[in-house]
Amino acid sequence: MALGASPDDLIAISPTEHPSVVESARIGWEDRVIKLRVDRSGRIDEDFLNEVLVGRRPRLVCIMAANNETGVLAPIEQLAALCREAGSLLLCDATQWIGKLPPDNLEGADFLTGCGHKFGAPK
């Protein structure tokens, strides 16, 4: 079980998340992972996300800000607002965003993750 989580807590993750996020969810949350949906272009299915938020009330939602394989940019501010309304926290993998795009578009996310080597730090 994830540190600080209750046995009833759920986590919702995008199917396009980096393997490190998917594996961490599998290990930390075991069978309490809800897989979100994306459309044909790889964008989050916001209707399904809203259904999950209202019906299942996950403690944490994980959505990648920018996908380096598809080029999809998630509307983080909008998704964060949906999560906030439902009382869920939003973790945003901003690895491909940081240093390339304006950080103000990431406002509203409760947690941001990134990798320094993407903008000049050592690996």
Image (cartoon, rainbow, N blue to C red):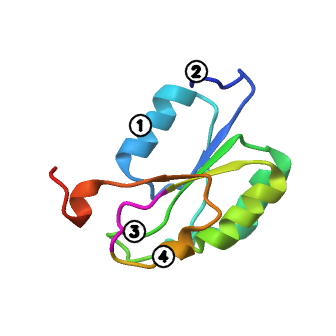
Viewer-nearest of discs 4 and 1: 4
Residue 1 bears which disc, if any? Answer: 2
SS state under label 1: helix
SS state under label 2: loop
Q: How many marks?
A: 4
| Drawn side of residue 31 relative to residue 83, left or right | left
Residue 76 at x, y = what percent?
A: 59, 69
Does residue 27 lie above or below 70 as drawn?
A: above
**In the picture, residue 11 is in which quadrant?**
top right
Q: CA distance from mark 3 to mark 4?
A: 7 Å
Residue 23 bears which disc, if any? Answer: 1
Asked if the residue at tag 2 contacts the one at tag 3, i.e. Cβ–Cβ closer than 8 Å, the answer is no
SS state under label 4: loop
The residue closer to the viewer here, 87 or 57, is 87
* Disc 4 packing (10 Å; few <14; some 14–19; many ≥20): some
Q: CA distance from mark 2 to mark 4?
A: 31 Å
Q: Which residue is label 3 attached to? A: 67
Asked if the residue at tag 1 contacts the one at tag 2, i.e. Cβ–Cβ closer than 8 Å, the answer is no
The residue closer to the viewer here, 52 or 77, is 77
Q: Which residue is label 4 attached to? A: 73
Q: CA distance from mark 3 to mark 2?
A: 28 Å
> Which tag, 4 or 1, sits closer to the chain's start?
1
Q: Which residue is pictured at 41% across the width and 37% down the height?
A: 23
**In the picture, residue 48 is in which quadrant?**
bottom right
Q: Give the magenta-colored segment's residue range.
A: 93-99
SS state under label 3: loop
> Which tag, 3 or 2, sits closer to the chain's start?
2
- Inspect the image, locate mark 4, and give the three-letter code of the amino acid beneath it: Leu
| Drawn side of residue 97 relative to residue 37, left or right | left
